[in-house]
Image (spheres, rainbow, N blue to C red):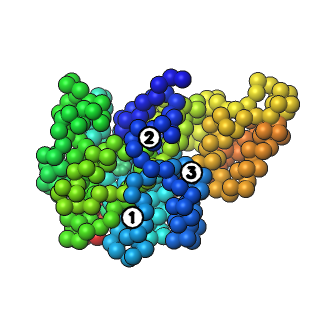
Amino acid sequence: MEKFRVTPWEVKGEVDYDKLMREFGTEPITQGLLERMRKLFGELHPLLERKLFYTHRDLSWWLDNYEKKKLIALYTGRGPSENTHIGHLIPWILTKWIQDRTNAPLFFQFTDDEKYFFKENLSIEDTKRLAFENMLDVAALGFDKKKTFFILDTHHAGLLYPLAVRVAKKITFSTVRAVFGLNNSSNIGQIFYTAMQAVPVMLPKHLTGKDHAVLIPMGIDQDPHFRVARDVLPRLGYNKPACLHSKFFPSLMGSSKMSASSPDSTIYTTDTPKEVERKIKKKALTGGRDTAEEQRKLGGRPEICPIYQYYMYLFEPDSKKLEERANACRAGKILCGECKQELIDRINKFLEKHQEKREKLRDSINEWLLSEDHMP
Ligand code: TYM
């Protein structure tokens, strides 16, 4: 098997998730933890139930704090290098679900500096503009505005920089080189950047003067930042953050992670119905057979089908119906064309509403930024 590689900036090859968990040193989300969350929250989100969020760091500690009514917070983010695709929504959807159940304040970081450092062809004006576009997607998911604080790295530099320097002083170049795979020709912004991603963990205490337990839902590619931050923050008087890691929502071509490098196999939240239809009909791979006749005889293979995974991650919340779909596919009772068409309809229905909400928010999106008038 081709060797895979996962860093915050690159996912290559077929990801072996168990191996990745061992490499990163994260813990599996056990059935016991799932049952505890079901009890605490009254239900389990399908992303948890289906183990698409599969590892964590210190989740029990965070739940203890919630249960004992101590101060908690949520933190997640986005590196604005392009429009949002539906893979990005995975950690945000779970974050919203947790916020709805815990009422925790959420710090949402938009790292326009990061994407400027890491993307050759983007200016700092581009990444800032994209950050505002991405903010519309986050707000459109329905977060509680009173409890949700957007942070834009260049905009909030005065607040963030004095905290980032304290983190940066405790991280050596050799750590950054080993953890992130940077090297002597990496620009020095890249080398510094991880300090900026640690800072929102410090904000709840910095802004209120009180210790908080912070939970960070994210795709597992972002974990290396927090492996480093967890090492440093206790030495600066802050709690280590807890983490929740998801697997990757796949590209339409079935490769491990939906990403911008192949726009034709990526569904953006800004795509038109026609674009969604074209990409799914023309580009998406399936677990189907070569001919309809063969498929009726041998059945399809949901295990290897990206279309099926789209239902599993986002577009079939009912687990019984999901199982029925898999069984019908295996038995050759539904063909790929039907399955694709139904997915196109579901995605377009979701996007139509999402795009409407985005546009309604456009004029007031600045109000979501952390400010003197919008503070926890
Ligand atoms: P970014 O913009 O690359 O991704 C934003 C979030 O989406 C997750 N993600 C995915 N999850 C599932 N399936 C996919 N195909 C997929 N693609 C991306 C990422 O893991 C991430 O959680 N440096 C960060 C921005 C950031 C951040 C944070 C992220 C700043 N602070 C705290 C998480 C937590 C970035 O560039 O993410």
Front tag of 3 and 2: 2
What residue sits right under mark 3 in the picture? 51
Q: Secondary structure at mark 2?
A: helix
Nearer to us of marks 1 and 2 is: 2
The residue depicted at 58 percent of the width and 30 percent of the height is: 253
**Mark 1 and mark 2: span between their CA atoms?**
22 Å
Residue 147 visible in the current orientation: no
* Mark 3 and mark 2: Cα distance apart in space: 17 Å
Q: Residue at x 34, y 74 (%)?
A: 70
**Distance from mark 3 CB to nearest ligand 1 atom below 8 Å:** no
Residue that carries the numbered disc 2 in the rendered image? 22
Mark 1 and mark 2 lie on one chain; the one further toward the N terminus is: 2
* Residue sitting at x 44%, y 40%: 22
Q: Quadrant of the C terminus?
A: bottom left
Mark 1 nearby-residue class (10 Å; few <14, some 14–19, many ≥20): many
- Where is residue 128? Give x, y as percent: 28, 45
Residue at 39 percent of width and 49 percent of height: 134
Nearer to the camera, 274 or 152:
152
Q: Residues within 10 Å of mark 2 (few under 14, many from 20)?
A: few
Of residues 182 and 20, which is closer to you in this image? 20
Instruction: From the image, tell me which residue sits under label 1.
Output: 62
Location of residue 206 with respect to 350 vertically, above or below: below
Label 3: element kind: loop
Q: Position of residue 86 (x, y in %)?
A: 51, 45
Q: Disc 1 residue type?
A: Trp
First in residue order: circle 1 vs circle 3: 3
Q: CA distance from mark 1 to mark 3?
A: 19 Å
Say what amino acid the circle numbered 2 marks: Arg
x and y percentages locating residue 271 in the rendered image = 53, 41
